[in-house]
């Protein structure tokens, strides 16, 4: 009964009313009100109040709401896990990624994964790093890929690859530069930058400032794609991850420049997963795809994955005997 009450309580908060909650859980309004009163009696606290036309949680209700959501997620995961026992290689998985990874890195891995496991539905949520990590911790995301190493007591972080940051310019604009560039030259260039504040911008600016360079930012955007587009039409130079501009450099649409006395700037793209994850077949199979694609050493695997507590013998790619 408590599980039904919690489910109804979540619907009340999500919809802001008894009537809409009753419609979603297929109960009458009196039945929903009765469940709410019973839950308040069990918890020994008032859980909701009316604010205008909406019902909103009290401070106690806000606390319970977050726990109730987690309980619902665990129940859904339990149902999925039981169902997967009879259908290995199928199911679904929720993946988190920052925008750069979603555009330039994730497609390669997911292409391999979906070809091998066509029965698995993949849901990708794109967000900022902090939101993505919170999704992993709360169990909303099975796994995520972010552009920084992560140290957190509830998360395992596995480095996948180092992504150098390139100083790029349009070929036509390069002709006006005095090469090779020095640090003083760099400070005088027009920069097209990723927006501030952001982890990438703070990281790059921090390294430059350590070497006495304060970038002269002419424009800033919240997309690496837009940044490199502005550079291509000759509006300035930019510091951009290699994964974003690798193909453009190879095609001759951008040129990577070296700067004397400036060391290589690199960031590490990492896979993150909860230390005690819901170990579904799709999760293990997707992690294996990532590790094989980037040739990750077994020493870097999470302990639970390394010891193979989950029997993955029946998780075979499509066509494998």
Image: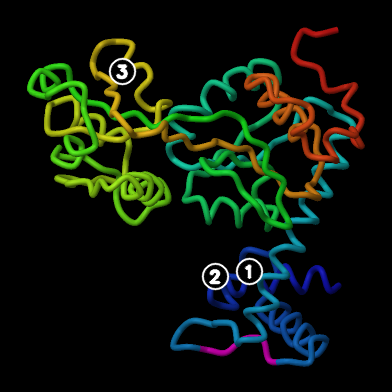
Whether tag 2 and tag 1 are in contact, CB under 8 A, the answer is yes
Which mark identifies residue 248?
3
For marks 3 and 1, give the one nearer the viewer: 3
Q: Circle 3 sits in a helix, a strand or a loop, which is it?
A: helix
Magenta stretch mostly in which secondary structure? strand
Pick the front one: 37 or 203: 203
- In the image, is residue 204 above or below residue 64? above
Pick the front one: 112 or 258: 258
Whether tag 2 and tag 3 are in contact, CB under 8 A, the answer is no
Q: Is residue 183 left or right of residue 107?
A: left
Task: Identify the residue under disc 2.
Answer: 15
What is the distance, in whole Å, between disc 2 and disc 1 at their CAs?
A: 6 Å
In the image, which residues are magenta? 46-50
Q: Quadrant of residue 74?
A: bottom right
> What residue sits 40% from the left and 33% below the top?
263
Q: Circle 2 sits in a helix, a strand or a loop, which is it?
A: helix
Task: Identify the residue under disc 1.
Answer: 11
């Amino acid at each position: 009964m408590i599980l039904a009450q919690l489910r109804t309580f979540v619907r009340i908060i999500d919809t802001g009313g008894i009537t809409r909650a009753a419609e979603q859980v297929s109960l009458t309004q009196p039945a929903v009100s009765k469940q709410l009163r019973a839950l308040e009696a069990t918890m020994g606290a008032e859980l909701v109040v009316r604010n205008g036309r909406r019902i909103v949680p009290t401070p106690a209700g806000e606390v319970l709401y977050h726990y109730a959501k987690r309980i619902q997620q665990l129940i859904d995961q339990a149902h999925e896990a039981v169902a997967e026992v009879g259908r290995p290689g199928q199911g679904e998985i929720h993946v988190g990624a920052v925008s750069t990874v979603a555009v330039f890195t994730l497609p390669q891995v997911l292409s391999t994964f979906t070809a091998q496991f066509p029965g698995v539905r993949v849901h990708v949520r794109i967000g900022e790093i902090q939101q993505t990590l919170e999704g992993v911790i709360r169990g909303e995301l099975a796994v995520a890929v972010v552009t920084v190493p992560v140290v957190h007591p509830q998360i395992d972080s596995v480095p996948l690859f180092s992504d150098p940051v390139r100083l790029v310019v349009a070929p036509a604009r390069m002709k006006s530069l005095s090469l090779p560039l020095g640090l003083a030259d760099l400070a005088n260039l027009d920069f097209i930058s990723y927006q501030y504040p952001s982890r990438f911008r703070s990281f790059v600016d921090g390294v430059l400032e350590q070497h006495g360079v304060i970038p002269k930012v002419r424009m800033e955007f919240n997309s690496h794609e837009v940044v490199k587009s502005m550079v291509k039409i000759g509006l300035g130079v930019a510091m951009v991850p290699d994964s974003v501009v690798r193909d453009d450099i190879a095609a001759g649409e951008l040129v990577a420049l070296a700067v004397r006395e400036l060391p290589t700037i690199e960031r590490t793209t990492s896979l993150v997963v909860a230390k005690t994850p819901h170990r579904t077949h799709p999760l293990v199979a997707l992690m294996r795809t990532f590790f094989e694609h980037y040739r990750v050493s077994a020493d870097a695997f999470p302990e639970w994955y390394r010891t193979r507590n989950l029997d993955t013998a029946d998780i075979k790619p499509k066509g494998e005997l």
